[in-house]
Image (cartoon, grey):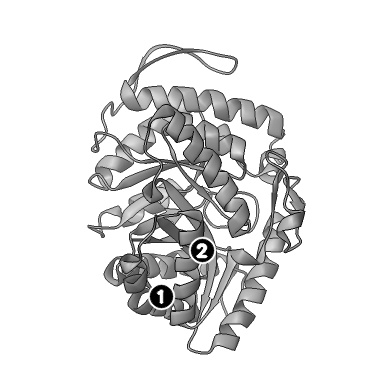
Amino acid sequence: MIKPWIFEFMQAPAAGDGKSLSGAVTAAFDEGHVFWLEAERLGFEGIFFSEHHFGLSLSPSPNLLIAAIARQTSRLRLGTMGLVVPFYQPWRVLEELAMLDHLTNGRLEIGFAAGVPQELARIGLGMEEARERFNEALEILDAALVNPVVNHSGKYWKLENLSLTPGVFRQSSPPKWTTVVSTGSAQKSAQRRSKICTGFESVPRISEIFDAYRTECARLDVPAGPDQLAIRRNISISRDAEAAREEARAAKAITLKVVAGDPRVVDRATSLLDAPKAGAGFSLHDDDYIAGTPAQVAEQIIEQCRKCGAGHLLAILGRAASPRRRESMALFGEEVIPLMRRAQIG
C-alpha cells in the first residue's frame, strides 16, 4: 500500500480580479480551508504543510493551519514537513507540538527540517550555524519527547530541570519525520528513529538515499520498511494528458524560481550521471514531475514507489488555490488513491 498525502506549499497570491492584496490573501486561506477539508472526504491519509518565509509561500506558521482545521476533521493525519528548527527555541517547539497533538486528538505527525539557505540568510543565519543549531535542537527535542523535564548543556542552549507544559502528548509516540536531501542526513535520521521524506531527485538517487537509511537501520536493528519512507512529487493530472504535461512544465518553472539561489542545488540537468555526490547537495530531475491522465499518474507513482521502496507519496497538486486545483484533487482522490492503496510495495 502507498499512503497518499497532500503536500501544501500554499503559494502567495498577487492582487487581481478586483481584489486587493489583503483580500487575495484572505481568499487564499478561505479556499485552502475548503480544499483541506475535502481531502478527508476523498480518502487522503493526511496533509503535510510546508514552512517558508519572506517570499512565495503563505505558510510561515504552519502549526496555525493545523490548529485551524483540526477540529473540523476526524481522520486526517496533520503535520509539517518540516518545522524549520533553527528559527526557534526547541523548548517552545515541543510545547506547541504537544498542544497540537491534543487539538488533533492524536493525529499529529512531527516533521523537522534544517531550513532553506536563502531564507536563513535573510535573518543573518549562515548554513553552518543553522546546521549546528538544528543538530543540537534535535537532541533536546528527541529527549523531551521521552521526558518533558529537560536538562541540556550545549553550545546554543543550557537548560536545567525545565518542565514543559503540556508535558504529555496524546499519542504515546508521535511519528517523527525529517526532510533529507543526502545520505548523511538519512543516516542521522535512522539513528534518531525518524522517518524520512525527500524529493527533487531522480528515483535512482532517492534509492541511494533510502539505501543509506535502510543500511543504518539494519545496523541498529530498527524498522526501515516502506512505512518509514516518503517521496514528495509534483502531480499534474487531467483527462487531457497533454494539458497535464503542460501543467507539469509550468510547475517545473515555478520550482526553479523557488530554489533559485539555493547553493545546495548543484545541477539542474535531467541525467542521473550529473547528480551530486553524497553530501554535496541535491539536483532537480524530471522524475519530480508526474503528469498525465489518472491512470497514467497512478502508474508512474506506483512505479517510482516500488523502485525506491517508499510507502508514502506526498502530492503537490498545484501550489495556489484555484478551481483547477480542486478538480485535480478530485481526480486524484477518486481514481488514483484506490490504485495506490492496492499497490504492493517491498
Q: Secondary structure at mark 1?
A: helix
Note whether residue 260 is visible: no
Residue located beneath label 2 in the image = 304
**Amino acid type indicated by mark 2:** Gln
Labelled pair 2, 1 in contact (Cβ < 8 Å): no
Residue located beneath label 1 in the image = 332
Q: Residue at x 41, y 33 (%)?
A: 193
**Amino acid type indicated by mark 1:** Phe
Residue 46's x, y, as percent? 35, 58
Q: Residue at x 41, y 53 (%)?
A: 65
Note whether residue 63 is visible: yes
Neighbourhood count class around disc 2 (C-alpha, 10 Å): few under 14, some 14–19, many 20 upward: many
Does residue 55 appear to the left or right of 154 in the view shown? Answer: right
Q: Residue at x 36, y 79 (%)?
A: 335
Depth check, mark 2 against mark 1: the one in front is 2
Of 12 and 7, nearer the camera is 7
